Image (cartoon, coloured by chain):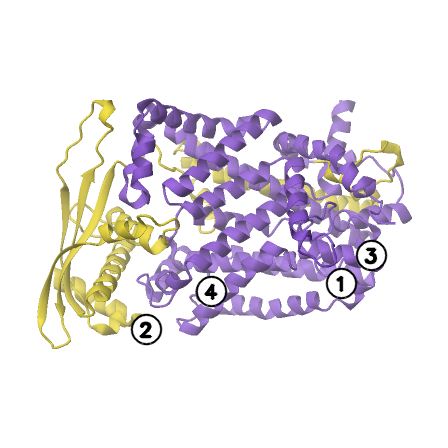
Amino acid sequence: MNRSAIALGKLVSKVTDSALGPYQSAVIRIGFAATWLLFLLREFPHRHELYGPDSPWSWELGERLVSDNGAFTVLLWTDSELWFEVVYVFAVLASLLLAVGWRTRAVSVFFMVGVLSLQNRSVFMGDGGDNVIHLMAVYLVFTRCGQVWSLDARRARRREAAGGEQERADVVGPVLWALSAGGLLAVSLSGTTTPDPFVPVLLWTVWAALGAWWLVGRVAPRSDARALFDVVGNIVHNTALLVIMAEACLIYATAGWYKIQGSRWQDGTALHYPLHLDYFSPWPGLADLLASNATMVMLITYGTVAVQVAFPFTLFNRRVKNVLLALMITEHLAIAVVLGLPFFSMAMIVADSVFLPTTFLRRVGDAAGRLTGRFRPDGQSGLASATAPAGTGPGATGSAWVPAQGGPGWAAERAKHGGEPGAAAPGAVAGTAAEAEAEAEAETGAAGTDAGGAGSHGSETSGTGASGGGSTRP
Amino acid sequence: MEAHEGGSPPEETHPPTGVAALGLPCRIAAAFALAAVAGVACVHLGMVFLHLAPSNTLSKQHAEAIDRWVYPEFEQNWKLFAPNPLQQNIAVQVRAEIRTEDGRTRSVGWTDLSAEDGRAIDGNPAPSHTQQNELRRAWDFFTSSHDEENRPVGSRGRISEEYLRRIVVMRLGRAHGAEVERIQIRSRTLQVQPPAWSGEKASAEPRYRVLPWWLVPDESDAAAGESGGSAGFAASGRARGGAR
């Protein structure tokens, strides 16, 4: 009894104290944003046919379907050509800015608006890849995905170095926020095309919360209320990350379990068929080669099903999970080329990468940092080599307008200055959430193992500064 | 994930952080937030699970609630090549009567639009959705919203007809630079031959599904993109009227 209470307390403090998986959330932010960006650029010559007012899926058809299903899109506000171009460029810019992590909190919302507006405008143009990006664009809004590998993180580091003075002068955040109000009013007043309240309510909620967060940070930067915002931000982030992981598992489980029921997957020839579909065989020679060997076709067919069904269960064992992860990423790379589905495959690989070990991600980040550092005159490491999550030091106090991107810095800081050490066991607040989070524990368990491994590795790069309260800089 | 706990110094050197550092009222608020967020996440995952799972007693019982939760933004389908991969190549073909610039009417024989897509995809490392999805999914949409006799089922049937017609007219217009007056669409389905080593044989005979001739409304519809308005609907009504 007592032991479970302690475990519960640990769990609660784990999900409230910090935004977990900074590298995993950064890699999916960059990945999904880049996938959508590349897709939009690739389709730039075809954009009118896909989403424009004179698309075969005409503005009127879109309007008829959307008035029926209530999906969110700003593209149907008017059938003006100019509006369409504006929205397309907006979507491109939002993807670019999200990938580089500029004002991540606000831009993740813009990214979602861009994705939903285009995809819901012409639902019949999309495929599985679009579906993944659609869902993840919504989930990303809830994550603090700019803690590392972002311009936000760099800004936080510089602010820290400058002793937190720049923050006062920050005008971009409030300006963005005020501008968003205009967009939100338009969303709400347009009324004609969005009978489903989910997205408008979400937009208003995020907007109000960020405004309040910023205000509390300005008025009472050392108050409990300010700390509460951080805690709730962490809770939302950690839950969203869990949902993203669960979503990836649901994708594989669905794909796998339904395949088990298929006669072609049973008789070991399934692989042969997609390779011979005219719509999915850009390289017929390669497809023929792959399909030529009976044994290989059978093994790949069975292997695909086995991996997809097994993957969610392997999350409980770090090593097996990583092996399967490598297999799945390899298979998706093959699908990208052989079936001519590069954007679908890229989206799936990004979804997979939320399960990558922190040590691996850091190594990739450091390598990328060295690579970009070589081209920097000041020799300063770039985005990629930011090893410590931003906002973990005192400089993060009341971090700018994009507060959600900060780590647990504030709470830690406050604890150092005025908190009541050990005032109460964290477990006391667990209450009814206990059962709900038990599942979370199981899920994050495996990923946690990875990050745990990173902990010891991290000590050499970022020092104990990454732990609550300390600063990474003297 | 312990990323933030970095070098794992002894526990007792840490002052309380997060919730533990809060005063009681805020701690209660945080507890409520945690319960609410966790609750919503569980409901969400449960709903998505039931949406994805085969129809079962639970999902039938709560079908309406699931649909209301999942649609429109969380709709998803992951039966990727499942339960069986598609085992036939379905090509959409069209023939038409077009009016050339000098005002004469000309017939265009059966043209395989899917084969055009296929040629555009061949050797293409990143096929466009316009080549890979547009016509293919429009035909799927049509067949799923029509009965065997090609009669529209439900409100989406009409929409799918107009969509298919607009794709075909756009592509004929592109190929011939002329105004399209009437079209007839058919699909040709060819079984993918099972692998040689499986000892199975599939029919090599193509199957055809032939739709009636459709009248194409005047160019106000072809230009509907620019002009907008309801002209397109009225026109498509006429087109269907003419087709019967």
Image quadrant of residue A167? Answer: bottom right
- Kindly identify which chain the residue marked by label 4 belongs to: A
Callout 4: few (<14), some (14-19), or many (20+) C-alpha neighbours within 10 Å?
Answer: many
- Kindly identify which chain the residue marked by label 1 belongs to: A
Residue with the mark numbered 3 = A161
Query: At 49% across and 26% down in the image, what residue appears?
Result: A310
C-alpha gap between disc 1 and disc 2: 46 Å
Q: Nearer the viewer, residue A450 or B175?
A: B175
Above or below, A413 relative to A85:
above
Secondary structure under tag 2 reads loop
In contact (CB < 8 Å): disc 1 and disc 3 = no
* A284 lies left or right of A143: left
Residue with the mark numbered 4 = A88
Residue with the mark numbered 1 = A215
Q: Amino acid at mark 3?
A: Ala
Does label 4 or label 1 sit earlier along the sequence? 4
Does label 1 or label 3 sit earlier along the sequence? 3
